Image (cartoon, rainbow, N blue to C red):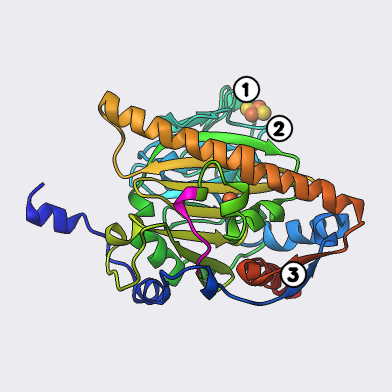
């Protein structure tokens, strides 16, 4: 790589990200935060609370439902089915993403069945072959003469508000409500762009159905207290108990930590930081983004019930592997991530769901290394009370 191309592939961090890095320290356990707080456990169990969370956090506001890398090419579409409202995502010839309720306007059946990205400019209903364009317009229907006076222009697909920002595709799943998309633009999108998320290529996607409350999965990725313990045979050796830095970006959280070998100091580029440091973003609602040395993990959570959550996991890379050695390298990364998540973090979230349901332990005890959980739950409460 020439000096110039090396410089142009660098991603400069935002001033806020750089300031957080400058606050990360590399000293040992005696410096970790000391604080005690408590949170109730019934928030994982209550059906009333769950309904409120769905209505106020997952409807009428932008929800990240997939990564940009899952719909990378113009003139393509894909169906997302994990959010109760079936969604058809399209990317038009100009690259603009749109979202629609995936229901045919003829007899209201689910329209498109493309679970994998599909190309082409038309989406045709399997029932009677009404065809829609990528902009949702009803383009053609067989035997149009048997529908006298039908106004095709009024029978386009029902559009959902959407935006592509920071490498994620965000959709307001309530077609009747207006959402505030400023929550995901500006600072947040700038930070996600600074860690190269919009340019990432999707290398692998995996889908999980967990027997857990969605917030317990978030909790598992918000604190470092468990890393040397729950992950003692996997990630544990890469981290020590150190002070982390946590900041809010609107209703979202950026939580940062240094790996073993991290040296305190300033870093101006993502490339200089990711070798020994981790960005972990918890986005409201339902997204977790974790940076590793040469890949980024995105987990999108869709609550199904108080004790059930679907998680779509995406492993994103700067450049898709081309050689056997590169492929083998990413296969090992994937195997490690899947082990850490499914056998460890997701498992802990399921154990928490079983425990909370008993009602026997009515509050969680949060120590200095778990205060990010306290903050996350405070944000949720503030959003639910709006
Ligand atoms: S229900 Fe779609 S074409 Fe008839
Ligand atoms: Fe973990």
Mark 3 and mark 2 residues within 8 Å of each other at the beta carbon: no
Question: Does dot 3 land on a helix, a strand or a loop?
Answer: helix
Q: Nearer the viewer, residue 197 or 185?
A: 197
Mark 1 and mark 2 residues within 8 Å of each other at the beta carbon: yes
Residue 270 picture quarter: bottom left
**Badge 3 local density, few (<14 within 10 Å), some, or many (20+)?**
some
Residue for badge 3: 384
Residue 124, percent from left and from top: 53, 27
Could you tell me what secondary structure mostly forms the magenta stretch? loop
Residue 324, percent from left and from top: 28, 24
**Is residue 197 visible to the viewer in this orientation of the structure?**
yes
Q: Is residue 79 above or below residue 235?
A: above
Q: Is mark 2 within 8 Å of ligand 1?
A: yes
Q: Is residue 222 above or below residue 199?
A: below
Residue for badge 2: 107
Question: Does the segment drawn in magenta span residue 326?
Answer: no
Q: Is mark 1 within 8 Å of ligand 1?
A: yes
Mark 3 and mark 1 residues within 8 Å of each other at the beta carbon: no
Q: Residue at x 55, y 45 (%)?
A: 153
Ligand 1 located in image quadrant? top right
Q: Residue at x 34, y 62 (%)?
A: 194
Between disc 3 and disc 1, the foreground one is 3
Question: Does dot 1 land on a helix, a strand or a loop?
Answer: loop
Q: Which residues are magenta?
A: 237-242
Residue 112, percent from left and from top: 58, 30
Q: Which mark is residue 128?
A: 1
How many marks the image carries: the answer is 3
Rounded to the nearest angstrom, the CA distance separating label 3 from label 2 is 36 Å
**Is residue 87 visible to the viewer in this orientation of the structure?**
no
Q: Is residue 4 above or below residue 201?
A: below
Choose the circle earlier in sequence order: 1 or 2. 2
């Amino acid at each position: 790589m020439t000096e110039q191309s090396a410089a142009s592939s660098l991603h400069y961090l935002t001033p806020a990200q750089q300031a957080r890095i400058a606050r990360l320290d590399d000293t040992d356990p005696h410096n970790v935060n000391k604080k005690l707080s408590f949170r109730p456990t019934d928030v994982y169990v209550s059906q009333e609370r769950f309904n409120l969370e769905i209505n106020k956090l997952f409807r009428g506001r932008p929800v990240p439902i997939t990564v940009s890398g899952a719909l990378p090419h113009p003139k393509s579409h894909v169906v997302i089915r994990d959010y109760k409202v079936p969604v058809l995502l399209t990317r038009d010839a100009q690259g603009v993403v749109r979202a629609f309720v995936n229901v045919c306007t003829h007899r209201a059946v689910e329209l498109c069945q493309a679970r994998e990205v599909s190309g082409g400019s038309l989406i045709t209903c399997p029932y009677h072959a009404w065809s829609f364009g990528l902009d949702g317009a009803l383009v053609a229907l067989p035997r149009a003469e048997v529908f006298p006076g039908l106004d095709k222009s009024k029978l386009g697909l029902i559009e959902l508000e959407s935006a592509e920002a920071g490498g994620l595709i965000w959709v307001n799943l309530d077609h009747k409500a207006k959402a505030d998309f400023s929550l995901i633009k500006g600072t947040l999108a700038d930070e996600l762009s600074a860690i190269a998320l919009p340019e990432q290529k999707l290398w692998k996607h995996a889908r999980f159905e967990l027997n857990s409350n969605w917030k317990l999965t978030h909790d598992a990725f918000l604190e470092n207290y468990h890393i040397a313990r729950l992950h003692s045979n996997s990630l544990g050796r890469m981290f020590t108990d150190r002070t982390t830095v946590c900041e809010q970006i609107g209703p979202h959280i950026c939580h940062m930590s240094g790996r073993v070998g991290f040296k305190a100091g300033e870093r101006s580029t993502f490339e200089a930081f990711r070798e020994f440091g981790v960005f972990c973003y918890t986005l409201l609602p339902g997204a977790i983004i974790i940076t590793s040395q040469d890949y980024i993990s995105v987990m999108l959570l869709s609550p199904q019930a108080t004790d059930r959550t679907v998680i779509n996991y995406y492993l994103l890379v700067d450049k898709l592997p081309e050689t056997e050695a590169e492929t083998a390298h990413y296969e090992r990364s994937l195997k490690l991530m899947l082990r850490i998540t499914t056998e460890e973090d997701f498992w802990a979230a399921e154990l928490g769901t079983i425990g909370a349901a008993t009602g026997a332990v009515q509050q969680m005890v949060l120590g200095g290394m778990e205060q990010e959980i306290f903050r996350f739950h405070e944000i949720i409460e503030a959003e639910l009370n709006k």
